[in-house]
Image (cartoon, helix red, strand yellow):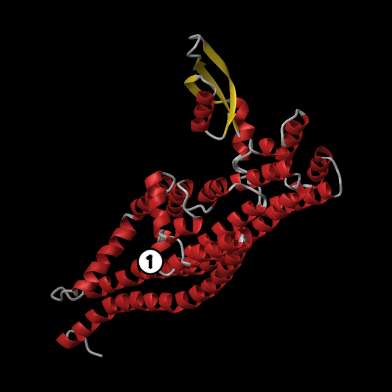
Amino acid sequence: MLAYNYIARNPSTGEKVKSVIQAQNEQAAAKALKKEGLVPLDISLSSKGFSGFMDRFSRVRSKDKVLFSRQLATLINAGLPILQALRSVSEQTTSKPFKVVINQIVNDVETGSTLSSSMAKHPRVFNQVYISLIAAGETSGTLDAALERLAIQQEKDADINSKVRGALIYPAIVLVVMLAVVTFMLVKVLPQVQVLYTTFPGYSLPIETRLLLDVSHIITKWWWLVLLILVLIVVFASRWSKTDSGGRFFDNLKLHLWPIGPLFKKMYMARFARTASTLVASGVPIIRVLEITSDAVDNVVIGDAIKRAIEKVKGGKALSDSLQSESTFLVLVPNMLRIGEQSGSVEQMLSKCADYYEKEVEEAVKNISTLIEPVMMVILGIMALIIVAAVLLPIYGLAGSGDIQF
């Protein structure tokens, strides 16, 4: 959270108000002021908010949150009061950023705030799933069980994310190596061909060689411009991906780009089912479950499908039927939900669905790793063939013309 100095006007009195507000960013600060009935006139980052600014670069790891959830669940289950349990966990936490967050939660709980509302002040650490489960646990008196479910879900999420990242790292490394080899050939090897053929003024180089030599000259002479363009493309793509249109484009690309599209679809199905199962088990109402999972899946396209399903459920339609017509949802999800609705075991069916797709993700990761290697080798071979052809064709042309003798 960052500290912002603000100047706002009170519409009822017309007076200007100057103060400081804690928010995640400037837009969030403006929204918070409007909720309080104020009209923001000026919002600027407070110099005192430097430590908060630095917190943005001090991420709390998933492993730390899993350990926090398990330790807190064990202490509460043993009968310790919530404040004493939080202090004990804080003392055992090795992560300094997380220790600061836990101590702030302790202070808020001491002043009378609930645990869930105290955690809600730290959205960069505790997401909506976490806060909703804690709130449900507080209401039902099963906070320890809610924390244990959270730990299990976080471990499952971390495991599946790690496997997907692992599947994408290998082709990324191979691609970088391929580009490095091709660049070396263009910059160091191909220009030697041009030097050789300057001794034969009447001979014209083939079109393939001339095109690659033009690329070589651009890279050699204008390397800084090429590098600048690449950096600008990366920065633009990064910023655009954070906008609504850009985020939707990249999320849609994840679902349809071969060969990673099926992998991502299964990953999102597993995430939806696991999150929904955990929330249902904690007694969260189904509409609220869908609202939370629409954000938790971390894909705008699937999130929109869930939001459309929410409207259908509000209209009296079964959740399974509401998701059946959504093409972004794999068939097994609504089918398993239908069985759960009919048998009164929605939580168990969602859990089984999550287990199934988590295993499918593991299998898809292995298949992609097996498939990517020959595909990359074929691409590398084609690129090498083009460069070798650009070098050898002129030599064969000269030999045929009799200008050089072997």
**In front of the other: 285 or 249:** 285
Q: Position of residue 178 (x, y in %)?
A: 42, 70
Residue ID at (74%, 42%): 99
Secondary structure category for the residue under label 1: helix
Q: Nearer the viewer, residue 184 or 230?
A: 230
Amino acid found under the numbered disc labelled 1: Thr
Q: Position of residue 85 (x, y in %)?
A: 82, 43
Horizontal and vertical percent for residue 304?
Answer: 43, 50
Determine the residue positioned at 24% across, 81% down.
393
Q: Is residue 141 visible?
A: yes
Residue at numbered disc 1 = 183
Q: In which quarter of the view is residue 152 placed?
A: bottom right
- Quadrant including the C terminus: bottom left
x, y percent for residue 127: 60, 45
Is 252 drawn above or below residue 95 in the view shown? below
Q: Locate residue 85 relative to residue 327 in the image: left or right.
A: right
Q: Residue at x 22, y 89 (%)?
A: 405
Most extreme residue toward the left is: 202
Work out whether residue 226 or residue 171 is closer to the camera in this orientation and state it: 171
Q: Is residue 270 visible?
A: no
Identify the residue at image location x=48%, y=32%.
27
Q: Residues within 10 Å of mark 1 (few under 14, many from 20)?
A: some
Q: Seen in the image, is 320 located left or right of residue 406?
A: right
